[in-house]
Amino acid sequence: MIRILTSPLAAMAALLLSVSGAFAEPKTIYVAENGDDDQADVGTEWAKAYRNIQPAVDAAVEGDTVLVGDGTYYALDNTVTCILQITNGINVVSVNGPSKTIIDGILFKADGSRDEKTTISRKLVVITSTAKNAFFAGFTCTNGMSATKNSGNCYGVSVGAGVASNIVAHLKNSWQSTCFTVSGGAKAYDIKVVQATNYNSGEPGRAFQIYDNGSLVDRLDITNITWPNGGSNWPILLVGNGNNSDTVTLRNVVMANIVVGTATTASSLPISIIGKNIAPVFENCTF
């Protein structure tokens, strides 16, 4: 019988190898408008960049950075209901900011032309509650769309954890859904909500919504938006869950040139509160 003896030194070496594997160095994954999702060693350098953001995000693990080059990024196909979903603590950032990097939810017809009248609901960006350390920055997000009237959901950018920064979100015909939402104690900085050029004033959406204890927005700009039909289309909506006392913070908020029909009812005021037990904190805000 042969007995194999493991020395303390060998055991320590094996332990060190397992620990070093558990704490691997974060990597950068590259995405470019002229990339290719199906090539070998995809995402390891600019010359081998992904073409689409979601496959790169799916390949990233906690602490990795997905770096996105200039260009416009669409859904993988017309059946996709969310262009980008972030579920873990990764960084998704553009190289040159929102003026150069666009996430576009538009659908395309068989002939390749744009389809402005969609029957498919499509969200642009969702950061889920599991992505506690996520960081999303430097994008314009446009053409999120709800195909269901009065859905109340967010079809633009929904930040349920982590941090979003330097984002331009376009408000368009969204059946009274919301353009930008912060919840779950997430933080958002340097957010601008603007009216899309292809905006349909007949069924506009809400500009911004915030809820859950600890959620914060700092430097929010909502300007030059018109809701000609009034109704329940608010620039800012605060939502209380009725169970806990939630404190949400709105800091350095600017709203200007906002027109909400001709009504003077509470549902048509620039800020509205739904539910109970929400304590908004306003700091240096101009309404």
Image (tube, grey):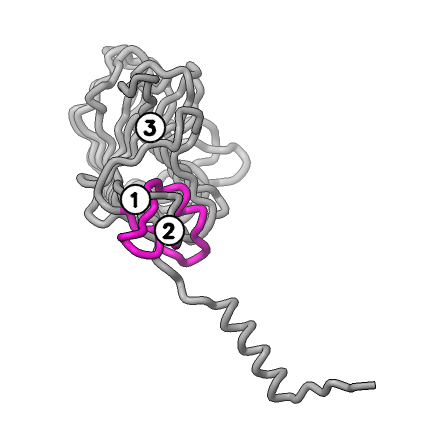
Q: Residue at x 31, y 42 (%)?
A: 217
Residue 49: say if magenta.
yes
Residue wearing tag 3: 105
Q: Quadrant of residue 257?
A: top left
Viewed as shown, does residue 132 lie left or right of 140?
A: right
Q: Position of residue 146 (x, y in %)?
A: 40, 21
Q: Which mark is residue 42?
A: 2
Q: Residue at x 32, y 32 (%)?
A: 74
Residue 255 or residue 88, whichever sits in front: 88
**Residue 223 in sight in this render:** yes
Instruction: Work out how far the residue at label 3 is from the one at label 2, CA to CA, in angstroms.
Output: 24 Å
- Per the image, label 3 sits on a secondary structure element best described as loop
Q: Earlier in the sequence, mark 3 or mark 1?
A: 1
Label 3: how many Cα within 10 Å (few below 14, some 14–19, many 20+): many
Residue wearing tag 1: 35
- Per the image, label 2 sits on a secondary structure element best described as loop
Q: Earlier in the sequence, mark 1 or mark 2?
A: 1
Residue 185 or residue 134, whichever sits in front: 134
Label 2: how many Cα within 10 Å (few below 14, some 14–19, many 20+): many
Q: Position of residue 45 (x, y in %)?
A: 30, 56
Tell me where the magenta segment starts and ends, as one range: 41-68
Q: Residue at x 28, y 25 (%)?
A: 171
